[in-house]
Image (cartoon, coloured by chain):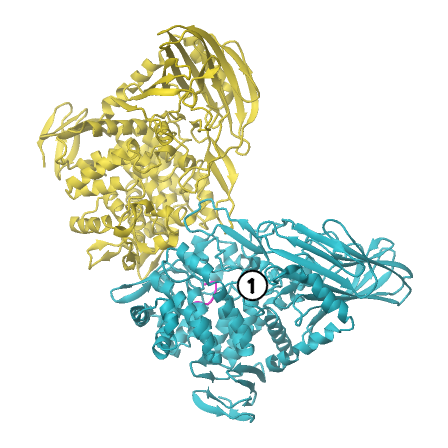
Chain colours: A cyan, B yellow
Amino acid sequence: MIITRDNRLHIEQLQTDESIFATQNGYIGVRGTFCEGYGTNGLRNGTFINSFYEEYPYRYEENLSGFAQKGQAMIHVIDGQGIEFYIDNHPLNMESCDVVSLHREFHLYGGYTTRTIHYKTPSQYEFILTEKRLTSLEQPELFVVEIDLQSLNYSGHVEMRSTVQQPQFSNTLSRDPRIGKTHNESFILRDIHISDDYGCIQVQTKHSKLEMAVSVTHNIPVQYTHNDKNITATAHASLTENEHFTCRKYVIYTSSNYHSNYVTANNILRQQILKNQSTDYFEQQRQSLTSFWKTCEIAIDGNERLQLIMNYNVYQLHTSGGLDSRFNIGAKGLTGDGYEGHHFWDTEIYLLPFFVLTNPQKAKTLLLNRYHNIEAARQEALNLGHTRGIKIPWRSITGRELSPYYPAGTAQYHINSDVAYAVIHYYYATDDMSFMLKYGFELLVETARTIYDIGHFHNGVFHIHEVTGPDEYTTCVDDNYYTNSMAQYHFQFIVDFYDKHASLLKSLITRMQLSDQEIKDFNQAAESMAIIYDETLQIIAQDQTFLSKEPWDLEHTPSSNFPLLLHYHPLQIYRKQVLKQADVLLSMFLLDFEDKTIMEHSYDYYSNITTHDSSLSKCVHSIVASALDKLSVAYDYMIDVSEVDMSNTQRNTKDGLHLANLGGSYMTIVYGLAGLRIKPDRIILCPRIPHDMNGYSFTIQYRQSIITISISDTIQLTSTNTVDIELYGNAITLQKGTILDYPLG
Amino acid sequence: MIITRDNRLHIEQLQTDESIFATQNGYIGVRGTFCEGYGTNGLRNGTFINSFYEEYPYRYEENLSGFAQKGQAMIHVIDGQGIEFYIDNHPLNMESCDVVSLHREFHLYGGYTTRTIHYKTPSQYEFILTEKRLTSLEQPELFVVEIDLQSLNYSGHVEMRSTVQQPQFSNTLSRDPRIGKTHNESFILRDIHISDDYGCIQVQTKHSKLEMAVSVTHNIPVQYTHNDKNITATAHASLTENEHFTCRKYVIYTSSNYHSNYVTANNILRQQILKNQSTDYFEQQRQSLTSFWKTCEIAIDGNERLQLIMNYNVYQLHTSGGLDSRFNIGAKGLTGDGYEGHHFWDTEIYLLPFFVLTNPQKAKTLLLNRYHNIEAARQEALNLGHTRGIKIPWRSITGRELSPYYPAGTAQYHINSDVAYAVIHYYYATDDMSFMLKYGFELLVETARTIYDIGHFHNGVFHIHEVTGPDEYTTCVDDNYYTNSMAQYHFQFIVDFYDKHASLLKSLITRMQLSDQEIKDFNQAAESMAIIYDETLQIIAQDQTFLSKEPWDLEHTPSSNFPLLLHYHPLQIYRKQVLKQADVLLSMFLLDFEDKTIMEHSYDYYSNITTHDSSLSKCVHSIVASALDKLSVAYDYMIDVSEVDMSNTQRNTKDGLHLANLGGSYMTIVYGLAGLRIKPDRIILCPRIPHDMNGYSFTIQYRQSIITISISDTIQLTSTNTVDIELYGNAITLQKGTILDYPLG
């Protein structure tokens, strides 16, 4: 499975492809820039370390109480990609040469990328430069790049300069709030030294005081030199026509937020790389992906492009995180600095559903990140006036709330229930009681406490005021359906789990000062939760006043005015019935809304007023459309979703891949077409095939079983263990190792 | 009538008294600082020119579409107050000497202040320094300070240094959003020169490019010198025991935002001051106030302090503005830099009611300021997505919206109807049809258009979504009663006026492209305006969801946590039933709500949940309490209101006087106790006397009549012209020149 892209040389294409060809492993991420650079146009270097950030003060013209006071932004770190070639001191790059052709490949089975570029110098010398690179899945600190320079018609001297250098920033200012701010503070140099066979830089950030080290070596003799910022390794060669010059470069990244002693970069280099020079890291990478592809490959019969992109999407998901509980997954993973590297509720609602079914260990690690940051979330709750409980930050790196605009940030209290939802579904899918007792139940109760605190009973109904749901085009409302319904589910689970496992929870209950009364309160709130059903429209209302607002005139809104948030004052948007993204429908999917008539009316109603300006939206519409057997629509949405990055449909893939949307694309198949739902004691399936495909198949992990699900003329199911499932509402036992063939519903 | 204050030497008292003893004339304002300074502690100099501001960029961490991008702040200008004395090179000031006593006076009839300070130097020499100063009401450019230095036990040389200097700023940073930002950019010097009998400085601001000039002269021989920033005039004298040294200093301010040629400062100085050296400006000032006091003095029988403060309050109101239609009145007038010198809807709702009844010309000038800035307001409407109409900025200096926090700023669309309300009441009180045809009706229609645009009909009811009413502790709500009821009144007036005066309006209607349909739309909106009445509580609801929120626990809120906005995250505040200031009740006062039962229930309900954290609140509660014959409560609020600055009850009088509250204190008598209301064709009165006073009297202008109203055992009314009024619901004709004696109701 290989993604290929040819001759995309326009600056926007180059930036987009930097994201598409970014390779990551949960610790480091390297964008698909050219190792030789683009010339002097100041493009970003694009190497990231997970949660490696710089701090800066937030400034408000009106600085109200409780506002976040400090920002954190994931920064471009010391960069080891650079390998430049000089022909008679003339650099080989886009700026100085003509490009005859450019060809790129992303090898999904191999876990590496290649790039072949054909340059013609002003003196008409032609070269083919091939780069092959990987971010190691076995050794998270390792980035490898292999270079091959072939002369087509040149004979003479060639100089290679391989660099490890401080990031260089362009000072482009953007007013798009979705773009990461440019932080061009330089690092403080701690050490820089070279030897015959390696070079090493250690630096510290100025404000966050994080430290990192980079060590570099090459498989050919090079001459290391350095100044006070950068290391350069130089090699000289003589080439004749059709002769190749090759070099492999190994770069090791370590950092104080991951390594107990970050200066071990050099030790790793010496012990892992220099001592094992025969290791073929590309082969190692391929092997480490074998089991992943065995269980995670998605087959789609009848649409090869869709199949390829789907697998690209799950590959990028798989490599984006779950390595360590100190790390979460940013909105762009490690593929770009969009949203400043912050993670959001995307992790729980759009990424966990993938990890829970494909790699429960990673799912657990991601949930543990919320637990790891529990004290920061407790501080945030205090900050918002709660005396108990925790408030999960809306956007964060280290657990602190970083949202400087509360109406579409901090006000999204639903994130507490989103985390709870992910905990519950991880538990249902894995039966991991040990996790629940050690971390899960505590997260559930602490997040529930703040939600309960913002609600209150009025005339016997539990109302939650002044919150923002997933739809950020309507903020600070009362009784947002998504928030209320998710809280209801959240509270109800706590009550049931407490009732069922009180004895196991004893010490935890004491430590948390959880009383029977508090459980009763949760129960009462769940039972009397305000849910607003509109009799006339036969739909669920998004909030108390939403349906009395004026609908936005989407029909007469010029397409250049989307996303609306970039073109209209928030008051204009908030005043109208218009959605950025699925809100009621997202809850209907997640909580498997029972009444299909109301669901269909709601789907029809909200579909008409949803802009899908968020990349978190169409996947939900696809899933709900599947549930309503609107398969053609579901399929169209699925295509749109799968193409978001590959076709740059949101026009900002350059800032990084839309990780949540990648998760969404996975969900459109598994939760959408196949109708998979995770229930307390079973999974249910309800597979359908849209007209535009012949079938599809995928594999999931459920508790102790690996279950393969193939849907074509019939449904074929296999499992590595005997397991009970529900198919089209019928209870079925899958016998270990035998294929169950079932008629398509 | 003299306000006196003794021995208030603590830094906070000094800063508070700078505001209390500030003198202003609508063009310049000078805070009551010490001419000799306080020493080196960097206090602000405190001279202001109306609407003389510096610009600075706003920065947002999330910069959304339509947000105000530039701030403007009224700045401290070149300052001509300084007169220092040196005894053997030792300065006479608080820092270098002991203060034996300090006595200050504000002469309300005279329109000037005095300050007498008794210094004892470290060498035990004692001096009494007396300063007498005024800001001229006849010559708005003129500030006069007269100094008298008396030696008590010193014989020897004394040096006087009189200065005109660039403002000096302390770099105190505050997180209180109500405080003006410190802008310590220096001016660009354009010219500085001296002669034998004067000195002159011309400067320009760096960013707003406003220019100003200051010229100075003295009535005694002095030696002028200057450097590149300041002018100093030096005089030497020999004093013996009990001998006095006196000097009078004249300072002329001109500026490019008022004078066609701002460099005329020197001309004015030469033509007005130097040529008329015998003029007694203090006597001139007293005379210019004669007619003001004749018509505006308030008498309160039974509470001398209240009477004195009331008259101080109306004095400061009278001198705060209305000089020129290019100027409005900032929230602090020209008495301090709080709120950055911005004006708000305070002008129309809290100040105009005073000016309309005491100085209709000034009232008109203030309304014309909105007309003067109509194109800026049109731009603001476009900015907010309106294709027609104007949006009056919530806070402004030159007509541009300066609010960087829209939920409690830009979202207050009611300001459009507030301006309309003031126009209507000015018209009712003056019958000034010429104003209506030239400016008033246009303002009414243009402001109505944007209000109409944000509303819409839903099930036959006209709803207005996503606005903030006067109460800033509940923001961005739907169908705020104040907003809706004021819009209803606003629309209805337009419809009636249009119907009645269509022929007069012909050319205006054409120019404004005002169609019959638009008038019908206004009419329909007014007739079907959403007004939410709660059957159970028998009150008017503040908005669609307000009454379902949880009440704030005021009882258990520590008094140190007020104002709430400084201690709680906005989400916490907005989520609850708690008011910063009167909202429903303000409308009930302004629109003279008919049903007294609903009014009383509403009063009781909202009184219990109102913090009065805004100084715009208690006056309204006092007025409504009067209307409900809760006279003891009305009186208590009246006392509170009158004391806001005099007793510094809001703890921020140092930033300037609370102008709106001064207007409010006037209203508690006239609109409160006397029950005055301005109706289309008459005024109505409904006088009451609380137990704690014996009576009160005041004078108003109504159309062509000056009417004096005295309430004691009976009501005595006189008018300069025959006029029809309504007293306790009875139509009465006041005959020109005869006293009408009427029993107290």
Residue in the picture at 30% in, 17% down: B286
Quadrant of residue A503 within the rendered picture: bottom left
Residue B549, quarter of picture: bottom left
Q: Is residue A171 left or right of residue B155?
A: right
> Which SS type dominates the magenta stretch?
loop
Q: Is residue A245 magenta?
A: no
Q: Does B433 sit above or below residue A230?
A: above
Span of residues in magenta: A579-583
Q: Taking A171 as reference, is B462 left or right? A: left
Quarter of the image with the N terminus of chain B is top left
**What residue is at 30 percent from the left and 66 percent from the top?**
A462
- What's the amino acid at mark 1? Gly
User: x, y percentage for residue A253?
Assistant: 67, 62
Q: Is residue B539 above or below residue B671?
A: below
Q: Is residue B439 visible?
A: yes
Quarter placement of the C terminus of chain B: top left
Compared with residue A69, is residue A523 higher up or lower down, i.e. above or below? Answer: below
Nearest to the observer: residue A137 or residue B348: A137
In the picture shown, does residue B163 fall above or below A682?
Answer: above
Q: Which residue is mark 1?
A: A330
| Number of residue marks | 1
